[in-house]
């Protein structure tokens, strides 16, 4: 199950209290103070881990606590430190303070580590208060208190390429054809109910992480369909591939369909609308060669942009599309996805 948001309550460990104790042994008349310091409480630590794919574990468990530090003990024994609570989150998770709305952390890369609630320091035992002029101290300090926070977790998928377009534009079919991902495919709208990730291997050295974003329809930015929930996932992609159905089953105009989605992207955020974009005309196997070329020419003329004709079913034009994606991303492409060489696909 894909879960991209969760609310949790985290509590760090309280520090252990210092100990008040005096050495009492036979034949040792002046043992002196020997109370040890308390142990430090455990911290709540967030770690971005590419082996974690969703926030499912956090939607079913609200409270996360680190262990308390143990109190100090006689014979100058230091109390044990409390264990940290390690919360492993999928890369792309943003962490907000629920009370203030402040962005606490943006775990964009695998291995990013953040202490979100530090454990309390252990208190001092009376042995640490002994001086030449104060040889029988009864002082000690308690451990520092725990820190409690209410956090909101929001996952934004990280990908090189984001597939956008109206439902049934062929996004899921394209993803399943060029990657090992297995999204649900059917001939009705909203077949895909959650974002899907896959990795396309252009050759042995070139790979692209591709995300299929579901639910984009007119007024998606205002909550229609599924778009208001999943539009944020497109923000993490570096390049948009806009799929336009060459022959929509409802008889709608491909040019108008393209502009509908562009309008929703712009309504969501100016940054999203400014992302680089390639236009792919999908399902071109449904038309004759002459009609296909006429449709490509018409769409390119109307939009004033190059159009790449593809057919996922017939596997035509897919290499050209992937090469165009790689070229658009450029030679300076960040190596944020080195882990993809170790796995077929993370989803």
Image (cartoon, grey):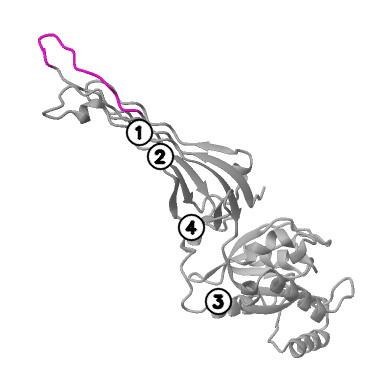
State the predominant SS element of the stretch in magenta. loop
Q: Distance of mark 1 from mark 4, alpha carbons? A: 36 Å
Residue shown at 34%/26% (left/top)? 71
**Label 2 with label 1: CB-CB less than 8 Å:** yes
Q: Check disc 3 and report its element: helix, strand or loop.
A: helix
The residue that disc 1 covers is: 81
| Residue 326 disc label | 3
The image quadrant of residue 74 is top left
Q: Check disc 1 and report its element: helix, strand or loop.
A: loop
Position of residue 284 measured from the top left corner of the image (x, y, whole percent):
77, 78
The residue that disc 4 covers is: 342
The image quadrant of residue 42 is top left
Q: Please report whichever mark, 4 or 3, sits nearer to the chain's N-terminal start.
A: 3
Whether residue 218 appears in magenta in the rendering, the answer is: no
Nearer the camera: disc 2 or disc 1: 2
The segment highlighted magenta reads 17-30
Q: Check disc 4 and report its element: helix, strand or loop.
A: helix
């Amino acid at each position: 199950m894909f879960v991209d948001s969760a609310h949790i309550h985290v509590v760090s460990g309280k520090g252990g209290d210092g100990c008040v104790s005096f050495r009492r042994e036979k034949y040792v008349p002046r043992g002196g103070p020997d109370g040890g310091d308390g142990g430090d409480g455990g911290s709540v630590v967030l770690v971005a881990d590419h082996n974690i794919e969703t926030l499912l574990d956090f939607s079913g468990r609200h409270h996360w606590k680190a262990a308390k530090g143990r109190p100090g003990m006689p014979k100058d024994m230091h109390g044990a430190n409390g264990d940290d609570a390690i919360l492993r989150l999928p890369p792309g998770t943003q962490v907000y303070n629920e009370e203030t709305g402040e962005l606490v952390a943006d775990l964009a890369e695998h291995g990013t580590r953040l202490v979100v609630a530090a454990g309390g320091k252990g208190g001092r035992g009376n042995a640490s208060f002994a001086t030449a002029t104060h040889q029988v101290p009864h002082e000690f300090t308690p451990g520092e208190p725990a820190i409690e926070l209410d956090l909101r977790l929001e996952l934004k998928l990280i990908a090189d390429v984001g597939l956008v377009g109206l439902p049934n534009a062929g996004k899921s079919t394209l993803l399943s054809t060029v990657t090992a991902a297995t999204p649900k495919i059917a001939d009705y709208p909203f077949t895909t109910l959650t974002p899907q990730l896959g990795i396309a291997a252009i050759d042995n050295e070139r790979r692209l992480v591709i995300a299929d974003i579901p639910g984009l329809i007119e007024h998606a930015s205002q909550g229609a369909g599924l778009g208001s929930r999943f539009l944020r996932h497109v923000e993490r992609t570096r390049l948009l591939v806009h799929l336009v159905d060459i022959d929509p089953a409802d008889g709608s105009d491909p040019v108008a369909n393209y502009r509908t989605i562009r309008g929703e992207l712009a309504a969501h955020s100016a940054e999203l609308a400014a992302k680089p974009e390639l236009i792919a005309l999908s399902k071109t196997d449904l038309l004759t060669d002459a009609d296909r070329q006429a449709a490509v020419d018409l769409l390119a003329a109307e939009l004033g942009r190059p159009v790449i004709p593809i057919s996922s079913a017939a596997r035509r034009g897919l290499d050209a599309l992937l090469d165009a994606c790689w070229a658009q991303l450029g030679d300076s492409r960040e190596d944020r996805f080195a882990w993809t060489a170790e796995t077929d696909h993370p989803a």
